[in-house]
Image (cartoon, rainbow, N blue to C red):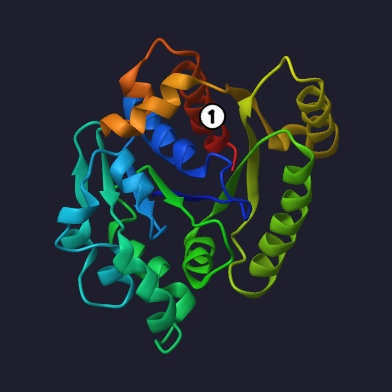
Amino acid sequence: MARIFCIANQKGGVGKTTTCVNLAAALAEAGQRVLLIDLDPQGNATMGSGVDKRALEHSVYHLLVGLAELPAVCVASEAGKYDVLPANRDLAGAEVELVELDRRENRLRDALRQVADRYDFVLIDCPPSLSMLTLNGLCAAHGVIIPMQCEYYALEGLSDLVNTIKKVHANLNRDLKVIGLLRVMFDPRVTLQQQVSAQLEAHFGEKVFRAIVPRNVRLAEAPSHGVPGVVFDRASKGAKAYMAFANEMIERVKTL
């Protein structure tokens, strides 16, 4: 039975897509069956997986509005060795169209039921806003992974996100919980980042993943080559951090 996780943060530019793509590739490298779902109309996770968003016959948009079944939308990431439900600009139109559809916040959950036994992990890359797309991701998921930078504004955004997750848990998805916080783009030379990291550990305890992803040029370069960072340069510090994170996720799932 697949474990479904949203990678979410209402703040933009915090490494959600980088985390989603590299976690998917690292889990696949560890022998897990992985499906990555791109719920962001920008389609960055799609391109970062080596799938050309401009050449798609079907996208996750067609799945959500009922124009295609999941098998017709699913494509393989040859670079990452996982499957992808890709996205492009068409998905922006789903925001308006979903409002008038039945079970509008559960469209993704309903679609995933038919492939629940086909994967070990399903990872959902959410857009940086509380939209109908993000709500579909949260309603389909068992838990939320929150990538965040160790900066003051990130703490402010974290409070809002945790409140949102509590509301979705109370009203729409009783399975939803915060799985953990992942510190990304971390620079140990910056005193403020060390202080915020210590605050997170003190406040959230075991919810904070042990793995820490450093600020890493090779991770930033990888999307331009259409491959995940853990494939682009396995020896880089960023790739090693995501491999450690994947192993930690596999262990954490056993205790859920």
Residue 27 horizontal/vertical position (percent): 39, 31
Q: Residue furthest top?
A: 235
Residue ranking furthest to the bottom: 100
Residue at image position (37%, 47%) is: 44
Categorize mark 1 by other alpha carbons within 10 Å: few (<14), some (14-19), many (20+): few
Q: Is residue 83 above or below residue 54?
A: above
Please name the residue shown 55% across and 56% down the image: 128
For residue 149, side relative to residue 20 (left or right):
right
Q: Is residue 90 visible?
A: yes
Looking at the image, which is closer to me, 19 or 252?
19
Q: Is residue 109 above or below residue 79?
A: below
In screen coordinates, is 45 left or right of 176?
left
Give the residue at mark 1. 251
Image-quadrant location for residue 152: top right
Determine whether 120 is above or below 157 in the image: above
Residue 159 placement, left or right of 48 = right
Secondary element under disc 1, as helix, strand or loop, is helix
Q: Is residue 80 visible?
A: no
Q: Position of residue 250 (x, y in %)?
A: 49, 31
The residue lying toward the viewer, choosing from 243 and 48, is 48
Q: Amino acid at mark 1?
A: Glu
Residue at image point 19% right, 34% down? 78
- At 53% from the left and 27% from the top, the residue drawn is 245
Query: As rendered, which of 218 and 117 lies closer to the eye?
Result: 218
Query: What is the quadrant of the C terminus in the image?
Result: top right
